[in-house]
Amino acid sequence: GESVGLHLPTLSVQEGDNSIINCAYSNSASDYFIWYKQESGKGPQFIIDIRSNMDKRQGQRVTVLLNKTVKHLSLQIAATQPGDSAVYFCAERGGGFKTIFGAGTRLFVKA
Amino acid sequence: KAGVTQTPRYLIKTRGQQVTLSCSPISGHRSVSWYQQTPGQGLQFLFEYFSETQRNKGNFPGRFSGRQFSNSRSEMNVSTLELGDSALYLCASSSQSQLEQYFGPGTRLTVT
């Protein structure tokens, strides 16, 4: 079946360092991938997305990398700040507007 | 633009009862998706509506149903509630052309 998983459930980084959150997916037919951030008591918030015809996309302090060969997705956060502390989800969407979410990684930022 | 709104924010029901949750999408968005979030199962897709039609459905029992109105507002209903239905129910909207979804704050349902 389809699944999107995360390598690490918890990640702790020092403020100012770069963070890398990894994600594996199994559906090679998925053509759209998204990263979401969820803070306590809130719904997931869109961070950045990437289509399968790309291997890298940059946003403000964030970069998403897609490696279709090994079905791997990563989110890089530059100069991590305390406000980045949250749970991060990767998600994939294939045809049919059905989004499959990964289990989530909790990011702790140490001051 | 106002964001996605969900009502009520918190709800306590007893087993066997039924519940209706409401979602108002971002103005102009015609697609509304519902998700169930629990600590054990994570975020799971329930269904997606577009222009009052259900376009896709997740693997949930028939007790879970939904509908969308002509103004794109959506409701989901859960009948014969079970303890395991306790969860955060999230609604997300997107425009026809965007795949990017915007989530509401969710409705926290507790079944006792």
Image: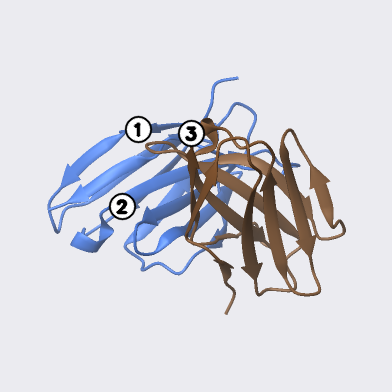
Residue at 70% across / 61% down in the picture?
A73
Mark 3: which amino acid?
Ala
- Identify the disc placed on residue B87: 2
Q: Are marks 1 and 2 on the same chain?
A: yes
State which chain is coloured brown: A
Q: Colour of chain B?
A: blue
- Identify the disc placed on residue A111: 3
Residue A44 percent coordinates (x, y): 51, 42
Residue found at the very far right of the displayed protein: A53
Q: How far is disc 3 from disc 2 in space, using C-alphas?
A: 32 Å
**Residue B38 in which image quadrant:** bottom left
Is residue B4 in view from this perspective? yes
Where's the N terminus of chain B, which quadrant? top right
Mark 2: which amino acid?
Ala
Considering only order in the chain, which callout, 2 or 1, is on the residue closer to the N terminus? Answer: 1
Q: Is residue B27 above or below residue B74?
A: above
Tag 2 subunit: B
Q: Is residue A25 left or right of residue B18?
A: right
Q: Which residue is mark 1?
A: B7
Tag 3 subunit: A
Residue at 54% across / 46% down in the picture?
A13
Tag 1 subunit: B
Q: Is residue A53 above or below residue A5?
A: above
Is residue B82 in view from this perspective? no
Residue B61 percent coordinates (x, y): 36, 68
Q: Nearer the viewer, residue B92 or B29?
A: B92
Residue at 70% across / 43% down in the picture?
A48
Mark 1: which amino acid?
Thr
Q: Is residue B30 left or right of residue B87?
A: right
Q: Nearer the viewer, residue A91 or A88?
A: A88
